[in-house]
Image (cartoon, rainbow, N blue to C red):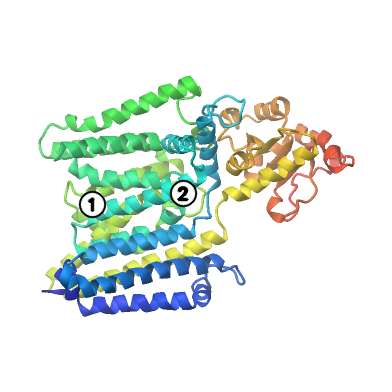
């Protein structure tokens, strides 16, 4: 029995290099458990500033080491009993170890909820409480979210008297685990080296962060990897085709770009049928029901919200342009290039190309290529995303990992045919996988040190202005601000969303500065203004005479986190809050930041 075939059999027949690898992993886990601070300091010396808090780094390393140690102890015990019970092969242990490490990494990020998730939480709460799909009580409906299916699931959780945030976290973790299980289904029939796709996906920083952020990314990623598995099976089995149609309908409801995957899947099946000289038009049927679902959503939006597309599209994606695909210098392509480097996929580009070139038609490898291409089309068209750790790339991490694993497996097969011992390229592939995974741990630690708009941080801003409103005798103060999650869901302050995501007038008219002046300062007249430079400058906020005349800077905030580019209060409220006259209008500087 050669070394490669032993990978598929119980471990007593495993080669010596595998025993050495397991022993080395156990020793590394022991070092981390005994000296987490020293290991964390050495690991983060190039990613964190000197003197940075290492609490999260220690916790993450400790979680990962404990997960690895537990898996190794169980593996050793099973090894002893395997000749008698012959339980599991190595592939299933790779799956189990990956799941343990992924759950450990996810639990280390349990504290993080992105502020955008709070917007979905607010709509889910208002829907479950019988107010409809509204953002502020008493205002018209607005589709300020991009994830209808996720909002519906969270609304159902609230109806069941479950906590929305906890439900979102648990659902995200469950979808992440299910996504890895589906990925295992896709790679288990391939060459054993392809199993390396599991750790590549399970410990990817983008996947860990965004599948546990409270947003719909984990659900979207699960539906995409399910599409990868079901697409080739749908050609032979009617049940698989029905399951594929259901998944594509869920994708259509999950995200605005979801219909794109249904069209891509239908095109793929039609081309496959045409190449086999069969009737190709029946294959287009997989897109019929998703198209009907999309049409129903458009009709609902027009009748309920007054727009055919989500309000978020008009606020931030109305400049989307497919012609960006032809411009290699566009922001979308720059985003993809940065994601390739940040996700550690630079080393995997050659295996990806080899996997796609060698992919048999009608395989999970070719369908993974279709899904990845469709998502990249969307990413480049919208110009990427500003959030850290590549939120728009995270949903295709399992599919890209599958391509890398399949490419590595193809390389090993070619080397085997050249007469090279199977275990040697297998070890090389394992080392390459480690080189891809290792920086992901560093990226997780760096993200935890400086995360993207945490929900609680934004809620602190809302609480601050709510307290000022109470001092002014306002029962329901109105805050003009561009972060709408924590302020609306946790603080419950009445918010005028300067970013336009949850305000239809701003989303449609932010380019018309005079219209914005009338709407903000004559119609709405916010009590407080808190803004960063981007959104203030986008509508010319500081140039409006109403802004300089009617609003004055606030005194320094009690904490640096509450100091912003613009922090203002309506002039007539200033004496009621601070007990002294408001400063003269000419003291109002273009920027109110106190520690730029």
The answer for how far apart the CA atoms under marks 1 and 2 are is 31 Å
Circle 2 residues within 10 Å: few <14, some 14–19, many ≥20: many
What x and y, as percent, mark residue 277? 10, 36
Across and down, in percent, residue 86 comes to 17, 67
Q: Secondary structure at mark 2?
A: helix
Q: SS class of the residue under badge 1?
A: helix
Q: Where residue 376 sits in the image (x, y, percent)?
A: 37, 46
Q: Is residue 440 above or below residue 255?
A: below
Q: Residue at x 55, y 35 (%)?
A: 501
Residue nearest the observer in this picture, 588 or 457:
457
The answer to whether one can see residue 27 in this image is yes
Identify the disc placed on residue 78.
Answer: none
Q: Quadrant of residue 99?
A: bottom left
Q: Nearer the viewer, residue 49 or 112?
A: 112
Q: Which residue is mark 1?
A: 365
- The answer to which of 330 and 585 lies nearer the viewer is 585
Depicted 480 relative to depicted 303: above or below = below
Based on the displayed image, in which of its 4 quarters is residue 381 positioned? top left
Residue drawn at x 70%, y 25% as measured from the top left: 523
Q: Is residue 345 visible?
A: no
State the residue position of label 2.
169
> Could you tell me how many numbered marks the image carries?
2
Q: Quadrant of the C terminus?
A: bottom right
Which numbered disc, 1 or 2, marks the residue that appears first in the sequence?
2
- Residue sitting nearer the eye, 390 or 170: 170
Determine the residue positioned at 41% across, 54% down: 207
């Amino acid at each position: 029995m050669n070394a490669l075939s032993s990978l598929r059999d119980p471990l007593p027949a495993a080669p010596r290099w595998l025993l050495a690898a397991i022993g080395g992993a156990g020793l590394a886990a022991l070092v981390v458990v005994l000296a987490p601070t020293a290991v964390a300091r050495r690991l983060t010396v190039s990613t964190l500033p000197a003197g940075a808090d290492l609490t999260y780094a220690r916790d993450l390393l400790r979680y990962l080491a404990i997960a690895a140690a537990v898996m190794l102890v169980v593996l050793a015990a099973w090894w002893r009993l395997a000749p008698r019970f012959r339980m599991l092969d190595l592939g299933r242990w790779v799956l189990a170890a990956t799941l343990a490490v992924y759950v450990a990494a996810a639990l280390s990020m349990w504290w993080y909820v992105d502020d955008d998730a709070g917007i979905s939480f607010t709509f889910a709460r208002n829907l479950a409480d019988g107010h409809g799909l509204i953002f502020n009580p008493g205002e018209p409906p607005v589709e300020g979210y991009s994830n209808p299916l996720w909002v519906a699931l969270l609304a159902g959780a609230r109806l069941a008297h479950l906590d929305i945030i906890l439900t979102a976290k648990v659902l995200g973790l469950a979808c992440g685990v299910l996504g890895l299980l589906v990925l295992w289904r896709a790679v288990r029939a391939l060459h054993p080296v392809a199993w390396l796709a599991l750790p590549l996906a399970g410990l990817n920083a983008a996947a860990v962060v965004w599948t546990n952020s409270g947003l719909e990314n984990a659900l979207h990623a699960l539906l995409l990897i399910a599409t990868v598995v079901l697409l080739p099976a749908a050609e032979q089995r009617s049940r698989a085709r029905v399951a594929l149609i259901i998944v594509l309908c869920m994708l259509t409801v999950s995200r605005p770009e979801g219909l794109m995957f249904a069209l891509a899947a239908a095109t793929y099946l039609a081309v496959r049928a045409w190449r086999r000289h069969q009737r190709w038009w029946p294959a287009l049927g997989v897109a019929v029901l998703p198209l009907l679902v999309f049409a129903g959503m458009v009709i609902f939006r027009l009748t309920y919200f007054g727009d055919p597309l989500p309000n978020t599209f008009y606020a931030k994606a109305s400049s989307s342009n497919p012609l960006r695909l032809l411009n290699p210098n566009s922001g979308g392509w720059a985003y993809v290039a940065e994601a390739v480097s940040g996700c550690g996929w630079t080393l995997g580009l050659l295996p990806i190309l080899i996997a796609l070139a060698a992919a048999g038609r009608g395989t999970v490898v070719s369908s993974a290529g279709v899904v990845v291409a469709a998502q990249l089309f969307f990413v480049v068209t919208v110009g990427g995303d500003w959030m850290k750790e590549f939120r728009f790339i995270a949903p295709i991490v399992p599919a890209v990992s599958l391509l890398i694993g399949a490419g590595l497996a193809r390389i090993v097969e070619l080397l085997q045919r050249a007469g090279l011992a199977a275990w040697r390229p297998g070890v090389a592939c394992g080392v390459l996988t480690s080189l891809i995974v290792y920086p992901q741990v560093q990226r997780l630690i760096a993200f935890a040190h400086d995360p993207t708009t945490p929900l609680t941080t934004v809620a602190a801003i809302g609480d601050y202005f709510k307290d000022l409103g109470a001092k002014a005798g306002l029962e329901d103060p109105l805050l003009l601000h561009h972060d709408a999650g924590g302020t609306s869901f946790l603080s419950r302050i009445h918010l005028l969303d300067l970013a336009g995501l949850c305000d239809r007038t701003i989303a449609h008219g932010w380019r018309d500065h005079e219209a914005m002046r009338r709407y903000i300062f004559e119609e709405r007249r916010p009590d407080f203004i808190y803004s960063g430079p981007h959104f203030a400058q986008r509508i010319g906020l500081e140039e409006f005479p109403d802004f300089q005349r009617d609003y004055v800077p606030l005194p320094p905030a009690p904490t640096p986190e509450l100091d912003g580019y613009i922090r203002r209060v309506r002039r007539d409220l200033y004496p009621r809050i601070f007990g002294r006259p408001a400063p003269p209008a000419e003291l109002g500087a273009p920027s109110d930041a106190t520690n730029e």
